[in-house]
Each structure stands twice: as C-alpha cells, then as structure tokens.
Image (cartoon, grey):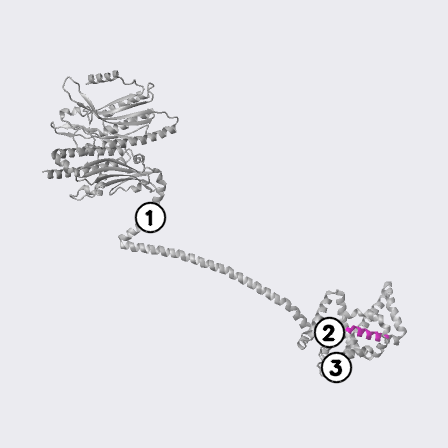
Amino acid sequence: MNARSQVFDLTMEGRQVDEAVATIFHTVLFHRCLGKYMYTGDAQYSIGTVGYTDVDCNFIDFTYVCCTSDSLTHKVKRAINSFSEKLRSNESCGSGQISLEFFQKKKNRWPFPQESIPWEVWTVHLDLIKHENEDERQLCRENVSDLLTEKVIYITELMNRHDYVPKTPSQSELDLIFDTSFPDVQPYLFKFDYSTSGSAAPSMGNAMKKIIKETLAM
Amino acid sequence: MSAQRLNAAERDLEKFIKFLVLKSTQVVVQSRLGEKMQTQCNPLAGSDWFNIAVQDHPEVLDETKRALNLKTGESILQRLPLCVEISLKTTEGDQMVLEVWSLDLLQPQNGASPATNDLNPEGQTLKAAHAIYNRMGIMLKSLISLTRTTPAYKLSRRQCPDSYGIFYRIYVDRPQVHTLGEGHKHVKIGQLSTIVGSLVMSVAYRTKLTISPTAAQSESNTIMLKSDHFRPATDANTPGNQQQTQNGTVVAKKLGLGALNPAQGTADRRFIDIEKPLRPGAFTDMGKLKQYTEDDFVLPETPPFEWLLRGRGSVESLNRLDNNSVASVNISNNNNSTQDSKFNQISNLNNNSAGFKSFEKNSENSVSPIKSLLIPASATATYRHHSEPSLQPPPDDDNLLKELHFPFASPTSHVNDLAKFYRECYHAPPLKGLNELQAEISSISSTPPASSGSGGVAACGPTAAATAIATSSADASAMDDLSRQLEQFETSLEDYDKLVSQFGLTGSSSTGSRSSGGLQMSN
C-alpha cells in the first residue's frame, strides 16, 4: 500500500532519452533480478546464477550493467521506445515521465479479481532540450554522464538499505511474487507506465477504463 | 544448542565474508582490464557464490590470497580492511593513483544481537543467514554497477601500451586516500549489519585528473629518490656489495677529488699564467726602465768625457778653481759653434797662425819701445782689428795652460816677475798673426793683375798701402810695430780682467797684478 517511490529529473536531448532511461531501469532491474528457482520440494529450492553484461551508450559517455537476458532486455527496450517516440512526437510538449513499478499480487477468492499491490516505484521525469551547436552537445554528453553517475550511486545506496522486499513464497505461490516468464532470470513482478504532458488530463473516465482493462487482463 | 548454533552462524558468516572479499577483488580488477564484460546466466543450480556469475581470474585470486595471508584456522575477520588500489602508469614511468576500493568490518555492538537471538533463535538464525547472504549479493551487484561509473573505468577502457596502463595493488590496511590528491570523493556502496560486525564497502576516487603533469614531475623526483634508496638497500642486504658500493662511493669521491685537483691545478696554472705574464711584463718593464736609465747615464756622460779628455783633463786634476774658467770657455766654444761656418774656418786659420805667433814673439819684445810711441796714429787700425780677438780664444787657453804649468808663481815674487815676463811674451803672437794675414792678402792682390782687369782694380787698394809703406821704410816699420803692440794689449784686455779676478781671490797676487797692469798702460 505504501510503496517506496523515487523520482529522477533529467534534462537532455531527444536522442539521449532511450539510453538514459535504460541506464536507470537496467541498474534497478539488475539488483531486483534473481536466478531461476528450482524447487526440489514444496519448501526446498535452489537458485540459479545471474550473468551481467556491459552496455556502452552511443549518445552519452556512459556504460551501464544489465542482466544477460535477451528477453528481459527486449521487454525493457520496447517500453522505453514507446515512451521515447511519444515524448519526441509533435503531440508532446517536450516533457514526460516513465515509471518502473514493482508489485506483488494478492490472491483473493472468486469472484473478486487479483489485486496488484506495488511495493517500489522508480520514476524518471524528462524534459527535452535542443542544442544549437556541437560544442553544447558535447558538454551535454558530459553533463548527462555525470548526472547518471550520481543517479546510479543513489540507486545503489537505496538498494543496500534494510528495506522491505517480499519474502520467498512456496512453489505454488511463486508467481505472486516473481515473474517466471523469462527462461534465464527471475525478476520480481514489474511493469512500466508512462505519460507525456500532451496527454489528456486524468479523469474518472480514464481511471475507470484503466480498472476495467486491468480486470479484463486478469 | 543455542551456543552451537551461534558458532555455526559465525562460521557461515566468516565464510560468506571471505568469499565476498574474494569476489569483490575480482569484480574490481576485472572491470579495469579495459574490456567489456559479459557473463552468462545459468538457470540450473550452480556453485556460483551469491548467485552471480563472477568468474575468477587466477592471478587476481592469488594476489588476494597472498595479501590476506590467511593461516590455517585463522579468521578473516582479523585481516580486514582489505583494499584494492587502482593506479595509472604512463610509458614514461609516471604514476598516479586513481581510486581505492575498500571492504572493512566495524566492531559489533554486543547489546542488540543476543536479544534478537534470544527472541527467536531458529528463525533469526536462518533468516539472518539467508538475509545476510542475499544482501551480500545485492552489495556485490552494486559494486559491479559502480565500478562502471568512476572516471577510472573510462581511462581503463582507453588504455593502450603506447600511452599508459592501469595497474592494481591489493593490500590489508586502512585505505591510503592521501595519494588521491585534493578534492577526492568518497562513496559508501553499502553497509550490512551482522552479529560479527558491520560490513562497509566504500570507494574513494580522484576527481582532478589534470594534476597528472605536476604529479609526473613529482613522481619523477620520487623515482630519483627511489634510485638513491635502492643502493643502500642492496648495501644492507649484502656486506660484499656494501664494500663494493663503499669502494664505488670512495672511487666516486676520489674521482670528485681528481676532478677538483685538476681544477685546483688549472687554478694554480692559471695563477702561474697570471704570474708568468706578470713576470715577463715586470721583466720587460724593468728592462725598459734600466735601458732608459742607462741611456740617461750615457747621454750626459759622453760630452763631459769627450771635452775633458780632448782638451783639459789634466787641468781639472791639477786645479779645481780653473774648472769655472774651463766651463766658461766651453760655453763660449758652444756659442762659437752656433756661429757661421766662415768664422769656424777663420778660427782654423788662427790656429794655424798660432805656430807662427810663437816664433815671432821674441822679435816683438825687442821692438816694444817703438810701438808705444806709434799708438795714436794706429787708432783706426785698432778698431778694425777688435773684431778679430773673438776668433782667438783657443790660443789664449793654451797660454793659460802653459802659465799654470809653472808652479813657482805662488811662493815668491821672483816667480811673479817671471809670470809677468811670460805674459808679455804671450801677448806678441796675435799681432804677428794679423800681420801675416795682411801679407797673405797682399800676395793675393799681386797675383790678379797678371790674370785680368778686375784683378787690377782690386790690387789698387793694397798697392796704395804698400806704396805708402814703401815711401818711408823705417817709419813704416816703427808704425806697424806700435799698432801691433796696441792691438795685442786691446785683445788681451779680457785676459787681464780674468787674471785680475783670479788674483783677486788671493790678496798679494791680486795687488801685484793690478800694479803691473797700471804700469804697462802708463807706458
């Protein structure tokens, strides 16, 4: 109910958005991914190994680490691309935000649907700018690099606190906590959500639509 | 039972910490090799610690174990903090420490742990172990992420053998952050509280990478210092080497002394060189001075020697009083020399006539009474002849010398009388000389009439005089004699004055000379 929430404010060019958001989200997911669980019994299991890969940014002087998992990488990339395209489109006013939300499901008896309870939310708020010449662009690369360094350090500090993380459940309830759809890694359940300033203001109609969609999805 | 469990938990913790240390050093060093890392996931259960695929680099593992230097049964807790120092080294040998990663264990607080354990030993133990293990995994992941954010990572990705290389050093000690320079940053990666203490993982890294030039300079100095220190270390290790190095140093000192000696030698030589030119200079100056002095002595000495030796050396030796007269005579001679050459020639003629004068003096003495009677008639003749006395100083000098040769003058009056007599005799020669000159003129006049008419015109004057003389042979001879005597007296006036001055010095002789002069004039 009371989920931890962190907001990062960034200002950069349009083409730097994808890599900047990927840096933050992949750093978070690297910490929130575990190896695959192999249950030998209902209460006994072993955990697989997580590999890591270095990724160099093209428009930012930065290198970040992500899990070695193509399926996970594709999922994150798809979400960020959708957000970036919308943010950089003419409909947008040049600002927006995208969220990475970790949640757990709560099992309820029929006919009520399953309830998603977020326990940690990471939000990146972006403002787009344009540079007149290459010198400013080069300075921007360095500034964004320093900024991302600070963000990564901050993420690691938060990750190493003695904060709440869901307990490991039994085998039958594993899907309530972890996303078991990936073949090589097992992250906590997460989802993306984004909006841009050009979007319509939130209203009861939109809220009801979201609730209905979620219910139908479930 | 609880005690055993606590011991087991501590053992597990020590094991977890040990492998956290080993994996941490691997993560840090591998991130600085300059390559992109990629390790694969393994869904199946594996032996990877903390469920993270960190492959062990053999060299790094050996270095870490060597640094820890763990003995059998020794706990790793006593060997913390462990540090990994990353430094940059250029091809020129300049070094710069970039960052220091450290894993430390802070002492625990005894109060809390027992209470928590007492509350629920079994659950707490299992939970604690599981939670600690998971959090160590998260800490390791944070380390993996952060090793890509510090400036050293970018430098390591761009390293190449031609420019610089990245090196690591693992040591067990407090982090040496003073080598990172001013303005370094310190980041705490994570902290994990356990029953054995709080694990703290942190990094301190340099931010001012532009200090490298000055650092290089200082490091070059340090390298020199190291080279200095290397020798004493070898000395300390081996006595033989010590002796050799001492000999070497002694040799160096000797060489130094040798170098100094030539310098001193050159200095001495330079002094000698300074002295040498001074000495020759002094010698040349002395020589020149001596030469001048010699010349000075020679110049004034030659004339006096010449005059004295030629004329009157003996006179000076006899009487000093006569030196004044001699000097005056010399001066007069000099004056004569300044006069025309004609007068010199005339003086020569007078000298030649001096011999004749000496022969004719006797005849003049016999005719003296006649001459005194003819004085007024030959007045004009005497004026004409006055010009000639200036040409007769040398003969007078000779006379004076002859007078001085007679030592009898001073003791008695008889000697004075003799001197007077000799003086009267000496006065005769100049008159005869004049007569001879006139005779020569007459002879010359006689020869021209025969040659030409002009000669005849010249002969009229002397012929008239000759005719006048011929008219009265006896009277003419008497007139000539008187005029000659008068001329002699007039020419000898200067001599008389000199004699008076000389005799004036002595009382008796002066009075005698004056009286004799007066008598002669009256006559």
Residue type indicated by callout 3: Asn
Disc 3: host chain = B
Depth order, front residue of B288/B434 = B288
Q: In percent of the image, x 75 and y 76: which residue is there?
A: B500
- Magenta span covers which residues? B479-493
Residue type indicated by callout 1: Leu
Q: In percent of the image, x 13 and y 38: which residue is there?
A: B6
- Pair 3/2: label in front: 3
Residue B397: image tag: 2
Secondary element under disc 2, as helix, strand or loop, is helix
Secondary element under disc 1, as helix, strand or loop, is helix
Residue type indicated by callout 2: Asp
Determine if marks 3 and 1 fall on one subunit. Answer: yes
* Labels 1 and 2: the sequence-earlier one: 1
Q: Residues within 10 Å of mark 2 (few under 14, many from 20)?
A: some
* Labels 3 and 1: the sequence-earlier one: 1
Figure check: B186 above or below B253: above
- Res A78 seen here: no
Q: In percent of the image, x 36 and y 30: which residue is there?
A: A139
Secondary element under disc 3, as helix, strand or loop, is helix
The residue that label 3 is drawn on is B416
Depth order, front residue of A148/B216 = A148
The residue that label 1 is drawn on is B225
Figure check: B285 above or below A92: below
Disc 2: host chain = B
